[in-house]
Amino acid sequence: MLHAGYTDIHVLRRAAGPMRQVDAQLVTTHINKEEVAHCVCAIICNPTSLHAETTKWCLSQGMHVLVEKPLSHTLAHLDEIQLLAKQNNLVVQVAYMMRYHPHLQLIASIIRDKTYGSLQRMETYWGSYLPDWHPWEDYRSSYVALKDLGGGVALTLSHDLDVVNWLAQTPVLTYAKKYAYSNELNIETEAIADFDIRYQNGIEAHVHMNLLDKPQKRRYQFQFEQAVISLNFFSAEMHIETKTGTIKDIIPDFDRNNLFVDELQDFLNRISRSENHNQFTAQQIRDSITIIDMCI
């Protein structure tokens, strides 16, 4: 919010205390939610199991909501969220920030324009070692590791399910999933997930995610009629291979944080406009229902 030029920022926390990365003088901290009921919008980033409940409360207070993915760990109450948002013309945006990645936005335009013919298949791979995520805490007590908090690799790393569903531009027709657990991590949620998806327009996708890879890996491949496009997230490289050669593009000084900044700015721009937000919010909730239904 500070990057976007806003200074009247309120933080609702479970308990008072020093903040890890934010200067406490730049924000007003509260532990009573009634003290933030006056806010115009809310960014929700508590454990997954609390997303839907917190979103409902914020909407009931008239706030627009940017909620961390996934929208929930269950399909319960999502119709209530839809109704509250519609009644008050409020934005509910789910924070799948990969939609703001420059290379993926370019690929979305390539798909729309059929630059290399029709898209046929997508493959994603994301592996990241859970104990490295938050070194300051015991990963076994984190929300990712606990069923009651909505954890598990599928919902937690569901960004890539959103990527393929978004780029397919048509509803899911069928899918199959396979989960596996890890003796090494000793957590109660799944550590490995694979999804095979077929869309109504015939496009196929395979999504793999795990909590085990050391070092972490994250890559994407898109097969078109006349080209294969591959992305490496960490090196910010894109290769477009055709019969006539390979085009290589690298995003200079790629900063993952820019995806969050762009997402936040889009959210703030959207809520500042005097327009009907119902269509956007309804689509965000439909997209979320698809992902949650696939994962649970």
Image: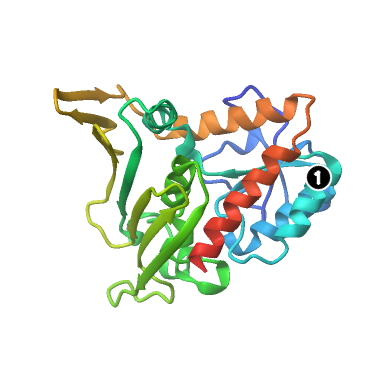
The colour scheme used to paint the residues is rainbow
Q: Is residue 234 left or right of residue 74?
A: left
Q: Is residue 247 above or below residue 291?
A: above
Q: Nearer the viewer, residue 125 or 27?
A: 125
Mark 1 lies on a secondary structure that is helix
Q: Is residue 144 above or below residue 60?
A: below
Residue 83 appears at what percent x and percent y?
80, 52
The structure residue drawn at horizontal position 45% and vertical position 66%, both measured from the top left corner, is 152
Figure quadrant of residue 91: top right
Circle 1: is it few (<14), some (14-19), or many (20+) Cα within 10 Å? some
Give the tally of numbered discs: 1
The structure residue drawn at horizontal position 81% and vertical position 50%, both measured from the top left corner, is 84
Task: Inspect the image, locate mark 1, and give the three-letter code of the amino acid beneath it.
Answer: Lys
Residue 32 at least partly seen: no
Q: Is residue 236 left or right of residue 255?
A: left
Residue 118 appears at what percent x and percent y?
35, 36
Residue 103 at least partly seen: yes
Q: Nearer the viewer, residue 100 or 258?
A: 100
Q: Image quadrant for the N terminus?
A: top right
Residue 291 appears at what percent x and percent y?
52, 57
The structure residue drawn at horizontal position 40% and vertical position 35%, both measured from the top left corner, is 256
Q: Is residue 117 above or below residue 51?
A: above
Q: Is residue 222 left or right of residue 134?
A: left
Figure quadrant of residue 95: top right
Residue 239 appears at what percent x and percent y?
22, 30
Mark 1, residue position: 86
Q: Nearer the viewer, residue 257 or 30?
A: 257
